Amino acid sequence: MNQKNSMQYTTAKTSRFPVGAMIFYGIGEISITISMVLFGLFILFFYNSVMELPGVLVGIGSAVGLVWDAILDPYIGHRSDRSQSRFGRRHSYMLLGACTMGVSFWLLLSPPRDLSVTYLFLWLLITTLLFRTASAIYRIPYLSLGAEFSSDYHERTVIVGVRSFFGLIGTLLAASLSFILFFPDSMPGVDPKLDYSGYPKMGLSFGLIMSVAGFVAIFGTMRHRMSIQVAEKDVARQGRFFHGFLAALKNRSFRLAWSSYSLFLLAVVLTSVTSVHYYNWYAQLSESSTISRIQACFYVGALVGVFIWVWLSKRFDKHQLYIVSILCTATLLLSAYFLVGEGNLFGVGNAMPLYVGNALGGIFASAVWVLPGSMLADISDEDALSTGLRREGILFGIFNLGEKIAAGVSVLLGGLLVQHFVGLIPGTFEQSAVAQQRLGIVYGVVPAILLIGAAALVRGYRLDRNSLEKIQASLNQGPEGPHIR
């Protein structure tokens, strides 16, 4: 039942969100996606194959950090929903996070070389916790802020599309330049990724970029920080954290989107953390320049895909496009196992199929950068109608809780599978034929099965353009319902 609410909110009837502010906001996504890509590509490989920390311990350390991040996400969102700072509900949190992200990421990739196994594990655990805390303080208010800029069904997708575009530029540079700049091929037969010296330099360089991108988003959108104003009585009505948490999970649209997205992340992070292993030993493409080009193809495809999905979202419902993209991604991952590798159609040492496959994979996967964020902005209106409160923060926080738990489980699962199922021998380039074959299964088949499940989960989602218009009409009904100006 609707409750009286004095908050003010901008609707589609008002002027469009300025393009300049949209660009500044989008640049802030670079901070998030750089860390996600580099963490996925290098943490397991660096700590296991370079520092020789057992894969299970790497998985445990990384997973603990991500679970801690997951716990923080909804609480930070809840606190920012209640904030009455003169800097707005989101910007003060974003500033604190941006100031601390860079240095903590550098520390994560700079463990002293002479540490024992115990102290190396503690270094991984503590620096991961520091980085995940700083990242959460920035990320959740940042994502929530974007949902407040517009109530137009399609413009929300455009805002998320711009955000995704800049995030993909950042990850394209990180995924490609990280190999070229910090692990250049110098000696034939020597894998430069096994050289410790490149990792602290990479952490410092990309940590600085993360902080600077965050500052650009903060100060570039400061004048729009008052998109939503929360009255004192509405702060009190937000209630306790756990009450708000459980209330959010009662929303069926949110539950379906949340569970599907979490399962999707479980699949793609598992692929990401085992990708270097797959390239090195299953596809037998170990040259840094080749891996760099493979990564570049994926992110160039993803950049193109952003425009495709934003354009398609004008003509089709968001959740339908989301299902199509997930199933196509699953098909490509199955192809990475059944078409590439020893004895298969494209064999080993052949980079061209991976260039093409990653470009297509980027196009399909980019839908999941664009569509769920826009869907969650729509869900926040549905939530406001049922609760009488604007709670973008806790909704995005819970969404990211599922993301981080899924990512943590996938890193842990990746470590377990690499050590116990694949039987990978750390610190050496030579691996058995059985280990190589099983790496293909871990990289391609297992994630594909998870993706099919993610597509099945979201089939019951029903929040489309017409239903959203009805919800917003109810929100605009006057002083007896949530007031939107």
Image (cartoon, rainbow, N blue to C red):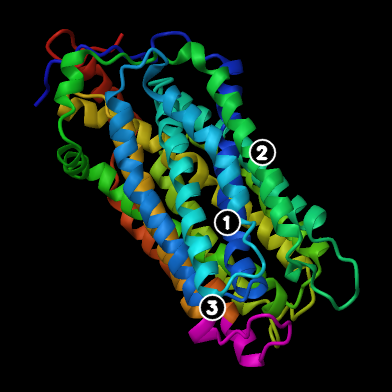
Amino acid beneath label 2: Leu
User: Looking at the rendering, in which quadrant would you find the N terminus?
Assistant: top left
Residue 316 appears anywhere in the view: no
Mark 2 to mark 1: distance in Å?
16 Å
Q: Is residue 160 left or right of residue 140?
A: right
Which residue is depicted at the point 22% across and 40% down?
Answer: 248
Left or right of 95: which side holds 254?
left
Q: Is 435 one of the magenta-colored residues?
A: yes
- Residue 115 visible (yes or no): yes
Q: Which residues are magenta?
A: 418-438
Q: Are marks 1 and 3 in contact (CB under 8 Å)?
A: no
Q: Earlier in the sequence, mark 2 or mark 1?
A: 1
- Which numbered marker is on residue 54? 3
Q: Residue 61: percent from the left, percent from the top?
A: 46, 65
User: Where is mark 1, residue-wise?
Assistant: 39
Where is mark 2, residue-wise? 208
What is the secondary structure assignment of the residue under circle 3? loop
- Within 10 Å of disc 1 (Cα), the crowding (few <14, some 14-19, many 20+) is many
In the displayed structure, would residue 405 be above or below residue 30? below
Q: Badge 3 local density, few (<14 within 10 Å), some, or many (20+)?
A: some
Q: Is residue 239 left or right of residue 179?
A: left
Q: CA distance from mark 2 to mark 3?
A: 30 Å
